[in-house]
Image: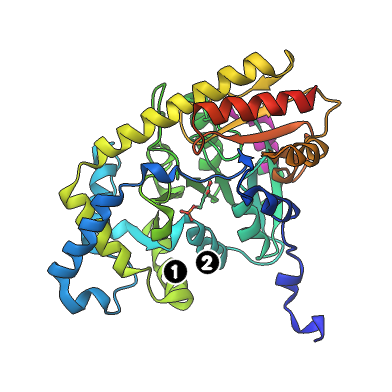
Amino acid sequence: MSLKLFSTRIQNVTPSFIREILKVTHEKDVISFAGGLPNDALFPLQQLKQASLSAFENKGSQLLQYSNTEGDLGLRNWIAQRYQAQNLEITAEDILMTNGSQQALDLLGKVFLNKKDAVVIENPAYLGALQAFRLYQVKFLPIDLHSQGMDLKQLKQTLSINNAKLIYTVPNFQNPTGISYSEENRQAIAKEIAKTDSYLIQDDPYGELRFSGQAKSNFYTLLPQQTLLLGSFSKTIAPAFRLGWIVAPKPVMKKLIIAKQAADLHSNSFSQAILAQYFEKNDFDQHLTQLKLHYGQQKIIMETAIKKYFPKNTQLTNPEGGLFLWCTLSKKISTLELFQKAIQQKVAFVPGESFYTSNIQQNTMRLNYSCADQKIIEKGIRKLAEIIG
Ligand SMILES: Cc1ncc(COP(=O)(O)O)c(C=O)c1O
């Protein structure tokens, strides 16, 4: 087959090297801190089973019929009410259900991005966003992340000389670093973007998983007309439902609905009905409390083990929620080389360099703590420390 048959768009996006090497982490006896999965022992299994039975009973054959593009109205109302409880003026009409928040990124690409358009991204950034936007052949404008958020000097300079259409952010418990933007950082970013006609994307799959500290302003309150807010049930209920959503101003929503229709007509209405039933009968906040309790404990266990076993010059972020810790080792160390040795010892993490689009810090690594218990976390971190030496 001639490779010329493929679009230039797909030819330009190679499979991520890191995803290839991470395949080995799925072997049974590997201690993996590499994935970004929620802990499956915490899925509300029985409650969802019950909710699906109720969905069959209540909806009958309508449960299996085609549905509307925007998504289940009851579910969108439920999402809107949670935003309203945080004083965000969002109604069901402002919400489009998507096939995970990953699809929201792709739809935004379809709606906004032409070849060579500029997209501001975090450096390091979520790999799925890089992949989604790369398919639209964009130019990335990376802004370094610090412990308090985006580097403001770089952002100001970048916005002043480029016409960026989108600014992509994960301000709460970022993937990969676990950092959150401070209140001052958010306000300063909003002030800069208000001078432009760009849109800020707040991708927020981890926002509800805060186990310490205080919630900060949602960009939607700081910049309501220019914020595109993405949410997901993947980390709070179950990723298999493939349900996320996007909140967008009306003119953008109109275009998103066209793009969504062209992509897949509508998101899975079966799983939306089950979720709507689940929320009707169960206390979601109580479920979240359980998740936060576990993840908060696991984070502390991993942090304590790293401080005990890793070299003293190791730097660590201090996430107040989410699933990840970010570790910076001595400058001499390449975590990609470390990964090859670690996998022989049956322990895995994600080397940091794949998350960077510039200014690569090859001595960094992402560690996921949500899926392992105390014993496994300690064992894995001790092994890693021995390999680092
Ligand atoms: C920052 C970020 N955005 C989006 C996603 C995609 O999530 P979903 O399962 O909702 O598609 C992830 C998944 O890990 C993520 O970390």
Q: Position of residue 219 (x, y in %)?
A: 44, 39
Span of residues in magenta: 148-158
**Is residue 281 visible in this depiction of the protein?**
yes
- How much space separates mark 1 and mark 2, taking CA atoms? 6 Å
* SS class, disc 1: helix
Amino acid type, residue under disc 2 in the picture: Val
Where, quadrant-wise, is the N terminus in this rendering?
A: bottom right
79 is higher (above) or lower (below) than 6: above
Does residue 157 belong to the magenta stretch? Answer: yes
Label 1: few (<14), some (14–19) or many (≥20) C-alpha neighbours in 10 Å: some
Return the residue nearer the eye: 264 or 363: 363
Q: Is residue 322 above or below residue 99?
A: above
Q: Is residue 87 visible?
A: no
Determine which quarter of the picture holds residue 58: bottom left
Given residues 244 and 201, the one toward you in this image is 244
* Residue identifier under label 2: 111
Check disc 1 and report the residue beneath it: 255
Chief secondary structure of the magenta portion? helix
Relative side of 195 to 74, left or right = right
- Give the residue furthest to the right: 332
Query: Between disc 1 and disc 2, whose residue precedes?
Result: 2
